[in-house]
């Protein structure tokens, strides 16, 4: 059995998970084991992916990978895959959608977002697929800011508490297109793909793992937007709430599945916005501008009077 640390929780796994931080702690909050699964699927999210939710938990199944079951309390994951399936595919499923559903089942607010540590606080980058979340974390890392999460941010939010909401480090692996990897200081020729035959690259930031085992207060949430001019625009609380709700990780998989905890997710998003605002981070598509984008994020994070912020770096 292997033991790892993600989102502040110990994860035990029969399958070696190469992209996640190991730990000496052997008391798991989430256990991942192999087993036989034979569910009757009733919901097709998209071609090749099916799911089912009942009182015992959530089943997730990919035609090209296999079937996974997450217990209703998010403490147990069982995977059923053929021996011939590329282990990288299995790890990709476990460390993405499967662990996200486990955290969601445990009561966490799970956002389709990435995060960096900026001035000892967590800055979140939120947006739909292809918005550049991983690219932003890579750009911040290239400018000296430690990565916290890629693609998934899981937050424990007690709506009755006034304590600051904090983010633990998630999976220390970035999934980057070759041009983004090269623009942020990574050698394309020396970096493995996320799985055999895929163009995206798997960049594991192992040098940053050991110093990221404590939670950090959420300070800023940046909604990534492509535009002609680099800048930051404020949005209303109403629009900020809509941005958060439209970027819930499970909603990305299936809006019907997400409806299971819709009221709880709404309350947690509202509570998060009591602590921080959402702003639009607008950048041109030119990857050569990424150092300036990182500098703008740092400049905004350092500004205490956000209403008086000027888009100058």
Image (tube, grey):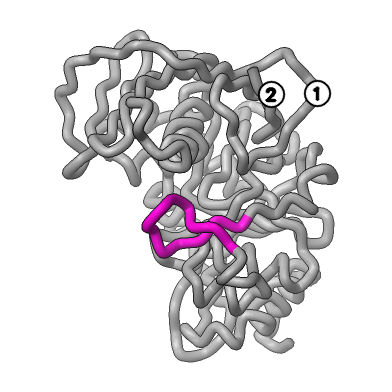
Is 217 displayed left or right of 220 in the figure? right
* Residue 14 visible to an observer of this rendering: yes
Percent across and percent down for residue 118 are 77, 61
Residue 274 disc label:
none
Q: Is residue 288 above or below residue 220?
A: below
Among the 4 quarters of the image, the one containing residue 199: bottom left
Is-magenta flag for residue 192? Answer: yes
The total number of labels drawn is 2
Q: Quadrant of the C terminus?
A: bottom right
Check disc 2: other Cα within 10 Å, few if <14, some if 14-19, many if 20+: many
Percent across and percent down for residue 193 are 49, 57
Q: Is residue 251 above or below residue 307?
A: above
Q: Residue furthest front?
A: 84
Highlighted range, magenta: 191-203
Percent across and percent down for residue 202 are 55, 56
Which residue is label 2 attached to?
3
Earlier sequence position, callout 2 versus callout 1: 2
Element assignment for label 1: loop
Which residue is label 1 attached to?
24
* Residue 266 visible to an observer of this rendering: no
Q: Residue at (61%, 32%) from the top-left corner?
A: 157
Check disc 1: other Cα within 10 Å, few if <14, some if 14-19, many if 20+: few
Cβ atoms under marks 2 and 1 closer than 8 Å = yes
Marks 2 and 1, how far apart at CA: 7 Å
Q: Nearer the viewer, residue 22 or 70?
A: 22
Percent across and percent down for residue 56 are 36, 9
Element assignment for label 2: strand
Q: Residue at (43%, 56%) from the top-left corner?
A: 243
Is 144 displayed left or right of 43 in the figure? right
Among the 4 quarters of the image, the one containing residue 160: top right
Is 304 displayed left or right of 168 in the figure? right
Is 206 displayed left or right of 287 in the figure? right
């Amino acid at each position: 059995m292997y033991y790892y640390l993600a989102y502040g929780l110990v994860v035990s796994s029969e399958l070696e998970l190469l992209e996640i931080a190991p730990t000496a702690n052997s008391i798991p909050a989430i256990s991942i084991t192999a087993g036989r699964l034979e569910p009757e699927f009733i919901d097709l999210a998209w071609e090749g992916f099916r799911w089912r939710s009942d009182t015992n938990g959530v089943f997730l199944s990919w035609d090209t990978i296999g079937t996974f079951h997450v217990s209703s309390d998010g403490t147990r994951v069982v995977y059923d895959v053929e021996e011939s399936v590329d282990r990288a595919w299995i790890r990709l499923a476990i460390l993405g959608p499967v662990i996200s559903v486990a955290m969601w089942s445990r009561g966490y607010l799970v956002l389709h977002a990435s995060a960096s540590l900026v001035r000892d606080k967590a800055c979140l980058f939120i947006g739909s697929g292809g918005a550049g979340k991983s690219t932003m974390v890579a750009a911040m890392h290239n400018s000296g800011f430690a990565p916290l999460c890629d693609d998934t941010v899981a937050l424990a939010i007690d709506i009755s508490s006034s304590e600051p909401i904090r983010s633990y480090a998630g999976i220390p692996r970035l999934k980057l297109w070759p041009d983004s990897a090269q623009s942020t200081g990574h050698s394309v020729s020396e970096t493995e793909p996320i799985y055999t035959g895929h163009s995206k690259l798997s960049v594991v930031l192992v040098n940053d793992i050991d110093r990221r085992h404590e939670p950090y207060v959420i300070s800023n949430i940046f909604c990534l937007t492509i535009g002609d001019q680099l800048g930051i625009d404020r949005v209303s609380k109403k629009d900020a709430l809509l941005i958060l709700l439209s970027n819930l990780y499970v909603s990305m998989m299936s809006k019907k599945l997400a409806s299971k905890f819709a009221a709880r997710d709404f309350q947690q998003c509202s509570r998060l916005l009591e602590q921080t605002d959402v702003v639009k981070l607008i950048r041109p598509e030119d990857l050569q501008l990424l150092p300036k984008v990182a500098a703008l994020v740092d400049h905004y994070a350092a500004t205490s009077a956000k209403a008086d912020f000027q888009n100058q770096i």
